[in-house]
Image: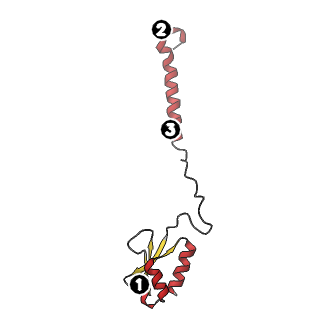
Amino acid sequence: MPWNTIKNEHDRWLPAVIACLILIGGALWAGSFLPTESSPPPTNVAKNESPAFTVQTFREWHGQVARFEGDSELPAEIYDVAVASLPDEIRAQLTAGIVANSEDELLLWIENLTS
């Protein structure tokens, strides 16, 4: 419809408002496909330690050596090692809980306790 035939002032702005709404809606829709910002990687991670590593603790479980993840009450793994067969020093450490704070420490303790 030609501009000179529009009789009402509101009729002149209606096409512009509709076009703006379409543009804004299209921009919002297209923005929903953009990747979201992820958190930065932790900066206080030790060189040998994986950021996803959960602290592991070795303790006695029904007379056997067991590995517990985090604060879990149930063992993640039970080893075929009788606590009674270990030296007194290791038994005392197991009573207190032997903590592995990294993958390297975990592997070292598994090797030491099971060999």
Q: CA distance from mark 1 to mark 3?
A: 58 Å
Choose between 54 and 25: the one closer to the eye: 54
Q: Which quadrant of the figure has residue 79?
A: bottom left
Up/down of 92 relative to 7, above or below = below
Q: Amino acid at mark 1?
A: Gln
The residue indicated by pointer 2 is 7
Whether residues under marks 2 and 3 lie with C-beta atoms below 8 angstroms apart, the answer is no
Which residue is at 49% across, 69% downward?
55
49 sits to left or right of 59 = right
Up/down of 21 relative to 31, above or below = above
Which residue is at 55% across, 44% downward?
34
Label at residue 64: 1
Helix, strand or loop status at disc 3: helix
The residue indicated by pointer 3 is 29
Choose between 99 and 31: the one closer to the eye: 99
Could you tell which of marks 2 and 3 lies nearer the N-terminus?
2
Up/down of 22 relative to 74, above or below = above
Choose between 89 and 63: the one closer to the eye: 89
Picture coordinates of residue 65, whole percent (x, y):
44, 82
Q: Residues within 10 Å of mark 3 (few under 14, many from 20)?
A: few
Q: CA distance from mark 2 to mark 3?
A: 35 Å
Helix, strand or loop status at disc 2: loop
Picture coordinates of residue 111, whole percent (x, y):
54, 83
- Way the structure is coloured: secondary structure
Which residue is at 52% across, 67% downward?
53
Question: Farthest residue in the left direction?
Answer: 62
Whether residue 82 is visible, yes or no, is no
